[in-house]
Amino acid sequence: MEDIREFIKSLPKAELHLHIEGSLEPELMMKLAKRNNVEIPFDSVEEIKAAYNFSNLQSFLDIYYQGAAVLIQEEDFFDLTWEYLLRAKDDGIVHTEIFFDPQTHTDRGISFETVINGISKALTKAKKELNITSHLIMCFLRHLSEDEAFKTLEMSLPYKHLIKAVGLDSSEVGHPPSKFERVFKAAIEHGFLTVAHAGEEGPTEYIWEAINLLDVKRIDHGVRCTEDEKLVSYLVEKKIPLTVCPLSNLKLCVVDHLKDHNLKEMLDMGLHVMVNSDDPAYFGGYLGENFYQCYKELSLSKEDLIKLCENSISASFL
Ligand code: ADE
Ligand code: ZN
């Protein structure tokens, strides 16, 4: 068993679906709460961990946005990102494309500059010291308005050179990609690539909308695509990558058991899928653990593991 963990670790891989705010470990949350004098409704790391019992995406998001409130100074964003990058190194990640949610912070009065400088300084250090390359993807929170997304896009323009793509995350159902068609068009005109969360909890129509209206280069999650044969054929034909997050789907009850996950089925259908950790501090494992659990529960072969890693590199924006 340990051999397979070493094998997984040895494969060069990219992570393409990782929310930096979702890598905030309870230990760092406690430390930053003290450092910044921020009240959190927990007295210990154990209490924080005990609260991580989710029934769906929204029940997670409520806790996740609350946790992010301890991030105040540039050095907090640096520490958060650096901790993730050290773990990434340990998992054999050679390239990572990191989501950040500016609105989670600017809505609390933290400047865009503070957020992006802290994250970017850690990414620059990782290139030098860990030999990990990276891109940043700025997500719009889909539960907020189009107008607020436009304001965020405007705010990002002085930092455009640091951001590769825009994405769409937060509460999916009731907030279809079509709500953000115009702001994505504007982002594309500014030179950003586009991705979007779709088909995590939301219906297959949202995946079609992300493709047809937002011109996405990848679909984030997309696991519900197997409900629509035409969509699967289209995704295969156009080689549109799907950034699948197995432990996230388990923790957020998209599947009841990892054995029921359709990752292997998607791989066998010829879909361009790879494995990602989404919000590893909340979902019980970083990338290596996602690979290992899938290997065990879905009876993946070594060839499957290699294919998943190859897909991660070819689906990246390198
Ligand atoms: N924000 C952080 N993680 C997310 C997820 N899995 N889906 C939607 N929004 C998110
Ligand atoms: Zn996500």
Image (cartoon, rainbow, N blue to C red):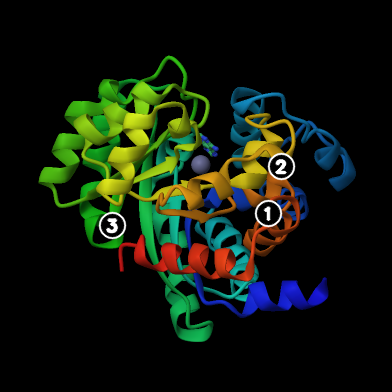
Q: Which residue is mark 1?
A: 294
x, y percentage for residue 218? 34, 47
Element at badge 3? loop
Kind of residue at disc 1: Cys
Q: Earlier in the sequence, mark 3 or mark 1?
A: 3
Element at badge 2? helix
Q: Which residue is mark 2?
A: 258
Does the Cβ of the disc 2 residue fall within 8 Å of ligand 1?
Answer: no
Disc ID at residue 193: none
Kind of residue at disc 2: Leu
Q: Which residue is mark 3?
A: 164
Residue 72 appears in the rendering: no
Which of the image's four quarters has the N terminus?
A: bottom right
Kindly indicate whether the residue at mark 2 contacts the one at mark 3 (C-beta within 8 angstroms): no
Q: Residue shown at 70%/44% (left/top)?
A: 282
Q: CA distance from mark 1 to mark 2?
A: 7 Å
- Furthest residue toward top: 174
From what the image shows, is residue 101 above or below residue 276?
above
Kind of residue at disc 3: Lys
Q: Residue shown at 37%/57% (left/top)?
A: 136
Disc 2 crowd, CA 10 A, few/some/many (<14, 14-19, 20+): some
In front of the other: 160 or 290: 290
